Amino acid sequence: MRSSSQGTRCEDLDAALPDLLDGLKDPDVEAHLASCTTCRARFAELAQIASAVADLADRYRPPADAEAALQRAMYERLRRRRAGVNPGWLAVAAAVGAVCTLLFVRPPLPPAPSAVGPRTAAPAPSSAAAAAPPAPLQMPRTSSPDPSLPRKRLRDAVAAARKRPPSAGPIEPVLDALADVARMEDPPQLDSGFYADEIRSLLLPGLIGRAQAAAREGRWLEACEDARLAHRLDRQADEGETFLLRCDAEAERIAVQAGEVRDRSARRSMLGGALLIATPGSPVYQAIEARLAPPMAVEGPQPAAGSRGSY
Amino acid sequence: MTFRGTAATLLEKMASLESADLEILRGIDRQDYPAALAAIARAYRPRIGAFCFGMLGDTDDAQDAVQETLLGALDAMPRFRGETSLRAWLLSIARHKCLDRLRRRAVRLASELDDETPGPAFDPVDTEWVRRGLADLAESDRAAVLLKYAVGLSFEEIADALGLSLSAAKMRTVRALERLRRRMT
C-alpha cells in the first residue's frame, strides 16, 4: 500500500476519480499519482477510455433528412392531438362529438310509425337541425355500469355552470360529462329543447370568452381551438365564425413573417405554428400547408444538394 | 398550469444559461412548443444522437430513438417545470426511449454480437472496441458513462437524469468506466 506524504492511499483513489477525471486537481491526489505507478497507470487508462467513449459519440451523424422528418412527425403529432387522438384532447373532441350528436344529429323521437300508409308530414325542422350536420366523431362505446351516472354528472355540471357568469362558466365539467354520455351504448335522451339549448348557451359564450382571453395573451393556438369548438357547436353563431377569420388572419400574418426569415428551420417552425392556428380547409390553411409540404420521395438518382427548393 | 408562472423567476436565475437553452425555455413558457422543439433539435440533436447511438449501438436505431425523444419532449413540454436542467430532462427522455427500444428487441444488445468471436484488442481509436465494451455493460452503467463522457453532463445532471443521488451517480459512472478498463486486460 502506497501513500503520498499527505496520506492519500491507493484505496482513496476511487473516491477521487470522478473529480480527477473531470480535470479537478487535488494536490494530495496528484502527489499520490506522482509516486504510485499503479494508480497512475490506472488513471491514465480510465482517462483514455473516457476519451474513447467521447470519440464514439462523434460517430453519430444525423441523416440529411432528419430535420424534415422531425418536422413532418411533429406536425402530424400536433395535428393528431388537435384531432383528438391525444388523451387530453380526446376528452374535448369527445365532448364536441357528443354535443354535435345531441344537438344536430339525433332527430326528435318521431311518433310510432304507422304500419301502413304514407308517413304524415314531419314536423318542421328547427333552424339548428336544418343546418348542415357536422360529421359526428366516432366514439368508442362502452357499457356504463349505471346509465344514470353520466346524466347525473351532466346535470350537476350544468347546475354548477348556471351559478357562474357565462364568460367564466366551467366548460370542462360540462364537456367531460357530455363525453361520458357519448360513450354510453344507449345515451339517455338529453336533446329535448330546453336542456339542449341550455347546454349550448352555456358552452358557446364560455368557449368564445375563453378564446378571446387566450388571444389577448397571445395564446392563439388555444384561442383558435376553442373558436373551432364553438363553431362546431353552432355553425350559425357569428362569434365563432368571426373568430375563425381572426385565426386565419393571424396565421397569415405569421406566415408572411416566416417568409422573411432566412433560417430554414426557424421558418418552417413558424409556418408550422401558423398551420395550427389556421382553420383547416381554409385558403390560408391550404396555402401554408402547401409551403410546408415535404418534397416528394423520388426513385432513382437523388437530387443534387441544394436543389430541394426553398425548404 | 404549465411552466408559465414559474418561468419568469426561473429565467432570471438562469442568466448564465446557454442562449439556446433560453430560447427553448422561452418557447416552452410561451407555449410555443413547435418553436421550442425546433430549438431543441438544433441545440441537442447531436448530443441526444450520441447518447442513443452509444446505448443502442446502431445508427438507424439511434436515429429512430432521437426522433422519438424529440417528439417525447414535445409531449412533455407542458409538464416541464424547470426542476432539472434541460439537458438532464432531454437525456432522461432519451434514456427511456432507448430502454423501450431495447425491451422491444427482447434481447440485450450484447447478445446481438457474436459472443463466440473474441472481441478486438483495446485500441483507444477503435470505436468498435468501445461499442462492444458498452454493449457488455448493464444498461444503467452504460447510460451513466455515456451521459458523462459522450454527452458531457455534470454528475448533478446525471443524478437528475437517472434518478440517483449525486454520490451514486459518481460511483456508477466510475464503476462503469472501471468495468470497461478491465476489458482492456
Image (cartoon, rainbow, N blue to C red):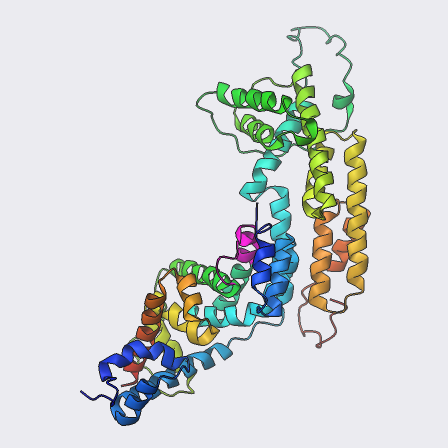
Rendered view: B86 above or below A159: below
Question: In the rendered view of the protein, which quadrant contains the N terminus of chain A?
Answer: bottom left
Q: State yes or no: residue B76 in magenta.
A: yes
- A92 lies left or right of A237: left
User: Where does the image place residue A292, in percent across and percent down from the top left?
Assistant: 73, 59
- Extreme-left residue of the structure: A1
Name the residue rendered at 73%, 75% in the picture.
Answer: A306
Name the residue rendered at 56%, 54% in the picture.
Answer: B77
User: Where does the image place residue A145, in percent across and percent down from the top left?
Assistant: 43, 23
Toward the viewer: A18 or A88? Answer: A18
Magenta residues, as a range?
A: B71-85
Question: In the rendered view of the protein, which quadrant contains the C terminus of chain A?
Answer: bottom right
- B96 lies left or right of A245: left
- A307 lies left or right of A64: right
Q: Is residue B57 visible?
A: no
Toward the viewer: A47 or A259? Answer: A47
- A304 lies left or right of B7: right
